[in-house]
Image (cartoon, rainbow, N blue to C red):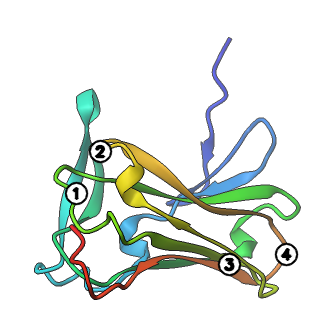
């Protein structure tokens, strides 16, 4: 029996052959990350995972900052209307982790109708040196508009690394 693999549908989207629904992955360079082009705060490196080796994509690594802000948005027109979606950020905390113990991040998803879902997450509770999925929220796709999402922590009291 052959596995049901997704059919690529553009550079960062795919269509599931089984049900015809579209999925989308935004890469870090497609997001707005405050200070990402300043090597004092962030450095870009090739993502390498275990025995897989280089994955062919870049990821930003936080060197240190009091202001961490990551934002993204996507037009609903690239999704399948009526289908339920989950918005997530993939992150990895590398040892040593500093500054996150008393500074939870604010995760927020804002939908085209103006409604939003938000929550606070304490990153210091997540496992180190492993990819973790930070779920920002769920929604049902509509025909028009765009949704936006963010991960923000701006406490001036602690430098996050």
Q: Image check: 159 left or right of 67? A: left
Residue placed under numbered mark 4 in the picture: 143
Residue 50 coordinates in the image, percent (x, y): 25, 32
Mark 1 nearby-residue class (10 Å; few <14, some 14–19, many ≥20): few
Which label belongs to residue 128? Answer: 2
Q: Image check: 65 left or right of 10? A: left
Which label belongs to residue 97? Answer: 1
Find numbered disc 3 in the image and state the secondary structure of the residue it sits on: strand
Q: How far apart are marks 1 and 4 (CA)?
A: 42 Å
Q: Image check: 132 left or right of 44? A: right
> Quadrant location of the C terminus?
bottom left
Q: Earlier in the sequence, mark 1 or mark 4?
A: 1
Q: Quadrant of residue 107?
A: bottom right
Q: How far apart are marks 4 and 3 (CA)?
A: 12 Å
Find numbered disc 2 in the image and state the secondary structure of the residue it sits on: loop
Q: Distance between the residues labelled 4 and 2?
A: 39 Å
Contact (Cβ within 8 Å) of mark 1 with mark 2: yes
Q: Earlier in the sequence, mark 1 or mark 3?
A: 1
Contact (Cβ within 8 Å) of mark 4 with mark 3: no
């Amino acid at each position: 029996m052959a596995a049901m693999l997704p059919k690529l549908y553009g550079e960062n989207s795919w269509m599931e052959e089984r049900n015809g629904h579209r999925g989308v992955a935004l890469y870090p360079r497609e997001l707005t990350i405050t200070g990402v082009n300043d090597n004092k705060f962030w450095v870009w490196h090739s993502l390498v995972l275990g025995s897989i080796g280089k994955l062919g994509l870049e990821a930003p690594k936080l060197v240190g900052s009091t202001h961490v802000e990551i934002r993204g948005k996507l037009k609903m027109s690239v999704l399948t209307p009526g289908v339920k979606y989950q918005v997530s950020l993939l992150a990895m905390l590398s040892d040593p982790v500093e500054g996150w113990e008393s500074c939870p991040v604010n995760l927020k998803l804002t939908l085209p109708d103006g409604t939003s879902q938000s929550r606070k997450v304490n990153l210091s509770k997540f496992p180190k040196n492993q990819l973790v999925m930070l779920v920002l929220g769920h929604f049902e796709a509509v025909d028009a508009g765009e949704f936006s999402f963010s991960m923000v922590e701006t406490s001036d009291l602690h430098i996050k690394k």
